[in-house]
Image: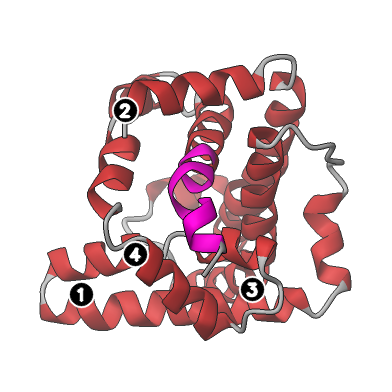
Amino acid sequence: MIIGDIKYSALHSLRGKWGQAFWVSIILAFFFYLIPTGIEIYISGGFWKWLEQDHVPVKADMINSVITLFLFPITAASYWYYLSLARNEHWKTSQLFSVYTTSMAWKLIWTSVLTVVFSLLWGLLLIIPGIVKGTGYSQAYLLLKDHPEFTALQAIRESQERMKEFKMDFFLLNLSFLGWGLLCILSFGIGFLWLVPYMGVANAHFYQKHIHSPEHEAN
């Protein structure tokens, strides 16, 4: 795999679509950053108390964990959005939420829970095996998009099987964005509104090239 080719393809897919990608990032930031932060501030007793505290209140952590659980389908839907860009397919922003109107939402939640549990169990042995296993499970959401008939466990197992030869490639692809990530931090996080879709579409092209390849789909 040539990382430069994957990233070039991602930029090409985003051409003329940056505006929509930006608004998708805004929506994701609202649900995954602003709402949890707002809950922390409220439970802490106000902004200044929240700013001065050394740790997040346990109650806020518990509430945010439950909220995150039910936001997993939006995470998956964002992956599907990036895949639609890689495939040059039409997509509406409302599709981020339409996933909740089907039984797929519960399957995505269960897939996410199993992925986290399996990764943590491997991580109890050693950190590296946990990371490797987590990388192996990384394609489950996209596989469920193309194979909605899969159960959560089937999607995870299929992801692990198809990623056998490509774990290092996937790791290096995402590592190549490290420099951009540091620049985004220096921009107080604003740059992530553009970096996240760039990475998402690059990972979608990786999926198209290696995981959704004809030889895999023929089996």
Q: Nearer the viewer, mark 4 or mark 2?
A: 2
Provide residue 11's location: percent of width, then percent of height: 55, 19
Q: Residue at x 35, y 60 (%)?
A: 163
Q: Earlier in the sequence, mark 3 or mark 4?
A: 3
Find numbered disc 2 in the image and state the secondary structure of the residue it sits on: loop
Q: Earlier in the sequence, mark 2 or mark 3?
A: 2
x then y, percent, for residue 44: 52, 61
Dot in front, 1 or 4: 4
Residue drawn where x is 80% and y is 80% of the image: 103
Q: Which residue is mark 3?
A: 108
Quick check: 91 above or below 44? Answer: above
Question: Which amino acid type is marked by label 2?
Answer: Ile
Q: Whole-Å distance between the Cαs marked 4 and 2?
A: 20 Å
Q: Which circle, 1 or 2, is nearer the viewer?
A: 2
Q: Is residue 151 visible?
A: yes
Please tell me the numbered disc located at residue 123. 1
